[in-house]
Image: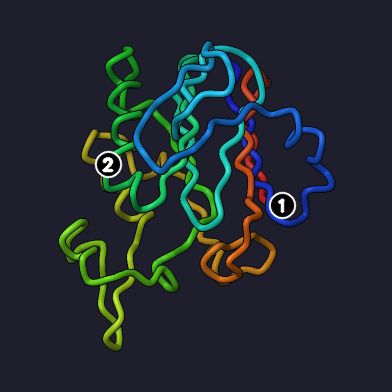
């Protein structure tokens, strides 16, 4: 069974420059709209519902990139952009629920979480306690920090997706200067989560 090939491309894009250029992208707006790959470009949304072979991209610079698929079939695959607004609107859970509704067994669903702003650095306002609760927002030395990864892991495990099937990167884009970070640099440049569907096996790399 063919599975997605996943590359997370940071500042060192030379190896993947052609793939980055050829990939299809959404006009992302920090919402929870899912767009089918059968749609004509350009489309507005923050998650791809991939229904056929191709190269698809999600642009992030501290936001979380997520890929969801079921191991027993090739399609659909979901490639998701989830910053705090997307997480607040439940985009990752929405995609997972749609995958299950299409017939996927939660026990066979796998997820990949890209490098992103981690709880060590993801400074937020006190209102995030109301948005996400004390389980996912901690206060240290008078400053609040949001754990976007833990929030979305919980969203998936609540749907009976197994924690051991969720591959989480421990790389913080705010700490690691190999990756673009809007919060660290104020940059307009973006890291790219590339998802290629139609390959022989799962491969995940960070560059």
Picture coordinates of residue 171, whole percent (x, y):
55, 62
The residue under the point 62% across, 62% down is 187
Picture coordinates of residue 170, whole percent (x, y):
51, 60
The Cα atoms of the two marked residues, 1 and 2, are separated by 29 Å
Mark drawn on residue 198: none
Picture coordinates of residue 157, whole percent (x, y):
27, 41
Splitting the image into 4 quarters, where does residue 86 fall? top left
Q: Is residue 104 left or right of residue 171?
A: left
**Residue contact at pointers 1 and 2, CB within 8 angstroms:** no
Q: Is residue 183 left or right of residue 57?
A: left
Picture coordinates of residue 1, whole percent (x, y):
57, 15
Q: Earlier in the sequence, mark 1 or mark 2?
A: 2
The residue under the point 44% across, 31% down is 45
Q: Badge 1: how crowded within 10 Å, few (<14), some, or many (20+)?
A: some
The residue under the point 66% across, 25% down is 55
**Residue where numbered disc 2 is placed:** 89
**Residue where numbered disc 1 is placed:** 207
Q: Is residue 193 left or right of residue 77?
A: right
Q: Is residue 173 above or below residue 50?
A: below
Q: Closer to us: mark 1 or mark 2?
A: 2
SS of the residue at dot 2? loop
């Amino acid at each position: 069974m063919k599975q997605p090939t996943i590359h997370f491309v940071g500042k060192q894009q030379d190896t993947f420059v052609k793939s980055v250029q050829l990939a299809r992208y959404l006009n992302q707006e920090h919402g929870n709209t899912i767009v089918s790959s059968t749609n004509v470009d350009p489309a507005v949304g923050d998650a791809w519902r991939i229904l056929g072979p191709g190269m698809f991209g999600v642009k992030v610079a501290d936001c979380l990139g997520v890929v969801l698929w079921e191991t027993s079939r090739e399609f659909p695959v979901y490639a998701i952009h989830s910053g705090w607004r997307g997480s607040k609107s439940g985009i990752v859970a929405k995609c997972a629920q749609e995958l299950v509704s299409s017939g996927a067994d939660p026990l066979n669903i796998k997820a990949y979480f890209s490098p992103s702003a981690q709880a060590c650095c993801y400074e937020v306002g006190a209102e995030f306690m109301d948005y996400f609760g004390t389980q996912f927002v901690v206060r240290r030395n008078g400053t609040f920090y949001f754990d976007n990864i833990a929030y979305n892991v919980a969203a998936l495990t609540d749907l009976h997706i197994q924690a051991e099937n969720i591959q989480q990167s421990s790389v913080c884009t705010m700490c690691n200067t190999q990756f673009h970070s809007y919060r660290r640099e104020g940059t307009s440049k973006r890291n790219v989560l590339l998802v290629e569907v139609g390959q022989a096996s799962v491969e995940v790399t960070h560059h």
